[in-house]
Image (spheres, rainbow, N blue to C red):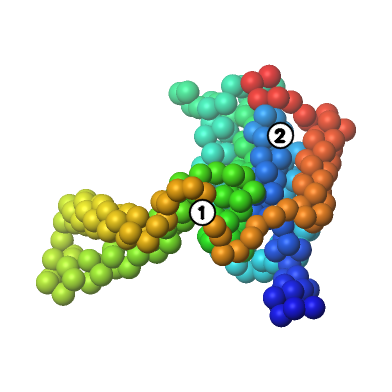
Amino acid sequence: MTAPQLATSATLRDGAFLDRVNPVSKIIAMVILSVPLIATIDWVSAAVAVTIELVLLPLCGLALGPLLRRAAPLALFAPIAGISMLLYAEPEGRVYAQFLLATVSDGSIALAVAVTLRVFALGLPTILLFSRVDATELADALAQVARLPARFVLGVVAGVRLLGLFVDDWRSMGLARRARGVADVGVIRRFFSMAFLLLVFAVRRGSKLATAMEARGFGARPTRTWARSSSVSMWDGVFLVGCAGVMVTALGAAIAAGTFRFVGS
C-alpha cells in the first residue's frame, strides 16, 4: 500500500463517519432533512428529528461543547419565532388570553412549540454536516462531482477564505479609533462609518484578488485540472439512505401521533 493510501486509511479510522462522505452528498442530505420539515408543521416530527440527530452526534465528529456554542444563534432566534406564533397565530380551540391583536389559544400554543422545535430541526443538520468540511474540499466536490463551473467555484472559495479578514479589519479599525480617542462617542455614526470603510476594503481586496487569480490562470480554458480528486463511494449511499430513514421515522411518528399536517392546512 502506498503512502497516500496509508494516510487515507488512517484518516478514515481516526476520523468520524461523516468525514468519509463527499460534501456534495452532504448538500443533498440537507435537502432530504429540510424539505419535509419545511412542508409540515407539527412538533412531533421536529422533536423526533432533533432527537435522532443528537443521538447520531458521535458519527459527526463534533463534541457537545462546540455544538452548543455553534447552536447558540438557534437558541436566540427559535424563541423569537415561537413567541410570534404564540401571540399572533390564528386562534384555535380554547382561548386563554387576548390583548389587542394578540391571542393565546390551544392552536397558537401548539404552533409556537412546533415552530420553535422546527428552527432547531432545520438548523442543527447544517451545523452537524458542515462543521468539519474544508472550503477546498467543498470546492473540489462542487467542481468534480456536481460539475459546477470551475471559475465560479474557485471565486466562491476565494471569497470564503477572505471572510476572516473582515473580522481583523473591523478590530483594527476599532483599535485605531480608540487610539485617537473617538471610539466612545457617536456609536451609531461610528458603526456606519466603519461599515462603509469595510465595504471599501472589500471592493479593493476583491479587485486585487480577481487580478491575481486571472494572472495565475484560475480562469483558463479548457477545463482545468485538480490537485485532489473528489468522488462518491459506498459511504455516500449509506449516508443518504440513513438521512432518508431519519425523515421517514420523524414523519411516521407524527402520523402515528396524529399531529402531522401540511403547512397552510
**Mark 2 surroundings within 10 Å by alpha-carbon count, few (fewer than 14), some (14 through 19), many (20 or more):** some
Nearer to us of marks 1 and 2 is: 1
Compared with 59, 92 (above or below) is: above
Q: Which residue in the structure is indicated by mark 1? A: 224
Q: Secondary structure at mark 1?
A: loop
**Looking at the picture, does residue 228 appear above or below residue 261?**
below
Does any portion of residue 156 appear in the rendered image? no
Tell which residue pokes out farthest to the bottom in this image: 3
Pinpoint residue 35: horizontal percent, then vertical percent. Answer: 67, 35
Q: Residue at x 23, y 72 (%)?
A: 175
Number of labels in the image equals 2
Left or right: where 78 falls relative to 21: left
Q: Earlier in the sequence, mark 1 or mark 2?
A: 2
Image quadrant in which you'd find residue 62? bottom right
**Residue 191: percent from the left, percent from the top?**
23, 54
The residue drawn where x is 70% and y is 25% is 262
Q: Which class describes the residues within 10 Å of circle 1: few (<14), some (14-19), or many (20+)?
A: few
Residue tagged by mark 2?
A: 36
Position of the N terminus, as image quadrant, is bottom right
Query: Splitting the image into 4 quarters, where does residue 72 fall?
Result: bottom right
Q: Is residue 199 left or right of residue 87?
A: left
> What quarter of the picture does the C terminus occupy?
top right
For residue 262, the mark is none
The residues tagged by marks 1 and 2 sit, at their Cα atoms, a distance apart of 38 Å
Direction top: furthest residue: 265
Identify the secondary structure beneath mark 2.
Answer: helix
Viewer-nearest residue: 101 or 159: 159
Q: Amino acid at mark 2?
A: Pro
Amino acid found under the numbered disc labelled 1:
Arg
